[in-house]
Image: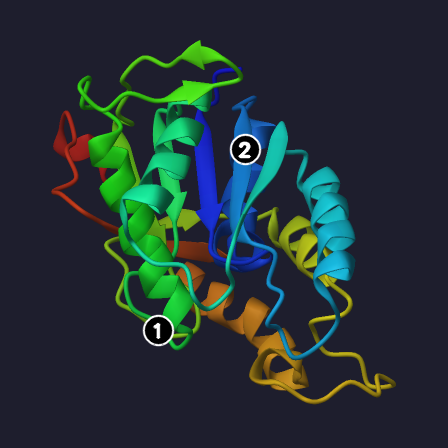
Amino acid sequence: MKLDILAFGAHPDDVELGCGATIAKEISLEKKVGIIDLTRGELGTRGTADIRDEESVLAAKILGVAVRENLKFRDGFFVNDEQHQLEIIKMIRKYKPEIVLCNAVDDRHIDHAKGSKLVSDACFLSGLRRIETELDGEQQEAYRPNLVYHYIQWRNIEPDFVVDVTGFMDKKVEAIMAYSSQFYEPNSTEPITPIATKNFKDSLIYRAQDLGRLIGTDFGEGFTVERYLAVNSLGDLR
């Protein structure tokens, strides 16, 4: 199956938090979108890996993504090496996305920056024909995505561009709250974590509102780029 967009996240819920509204919007425009989680989030303070597996399936259904897979790398301990790069290359060559979305380039959780660089490096290496990979008993062809963008997570990194996601925030929040084990629930007996506070839940809206304000819309999601953005004419900018 060829995808238009393939979004990678170090943990289940990273993609929903970073670019869930953008994904919902692209799907509404009849784009085929998939999600690849690098780990099961087994080191998370709240819930369990099995619970997060179930939650990620529900979140994918809410967003309407075409496919979701988990590479089951070690949460907290995966590294950017040949072994891990090859597993991601297999996914890129399998789905041949035009656009790859991945973790923030710098963030509070160490897996986010690691995952960001790992996926970015794999996107480049995937285009080298002398790197041979096999999936389901078949040799894969070299393939490199046209574009790699990084969504923004905990830290307020200055975006290179902002997507107008007005009309899609409800879908994003619904997908995020599918991870009921991870986020704010006043009656929960689980330990409090930075993302399990009411402030963090509220920030999903007010951060998107602020980015929307800056581009003249109600809501926005920001991304950073690896190379200059190209436009055909000044009229493409708004």
State which quarter of the image contains the C terminus: top left
**Residue at 64% across / 75% down in the picture?**
201
Q: Is residue 45 above or below residue 9?
A: below
**Residue at 66% across / 41% down in the picture?**
63
Q: Does any portion of residue 224 appear in the rendered image?
A: yes
Q: How many marks?
A: 2
Type of residue at label 1? Answer: Asn
**Residue at 59% across / 63% down in the picture?**
41
**Residue at 68% across / 49% down in the picture?**
171
Q: Which mark is residue 87?
A: none
| Between 135 and 100, the one nearer to me in the picture | 135
CB atoms of marks 1 and 2 within 8 Å: no
Of callouts 1 and 2, the N-terminal one: 2
Q: Secondary structure at mark 1?
A: loop
Q: Which mark is residue 156?
A: 1
Q: Secondary structure at mark 2?
A: strand
Q: Is residue 120 above or below residue 211?
A: above
Type of residue at label 2? Answer: Gly
Mark 2 Cα-neighbour bin, 10 Å: few <14, some 14–19, many ≥20? many
Whole-Å distance between the Cαs marked 1 and 2? 26 Å
Q: Closer to the camera: disc 1 or disc 2?
A: 2
Colour scheme of the picture: rainbow
Residue on which disc 2 sits: 34
Q: Does any portion of residue 216 appear in the rendered image?
A: no
Residue 158, given in percent of the width and then of the height, sits at: 26, 66
Residue 153, given in percent of the width and then of the height, sits at: 43, 66
Residue 226, given in percent of the width and then of the height, sits at: 18, 47
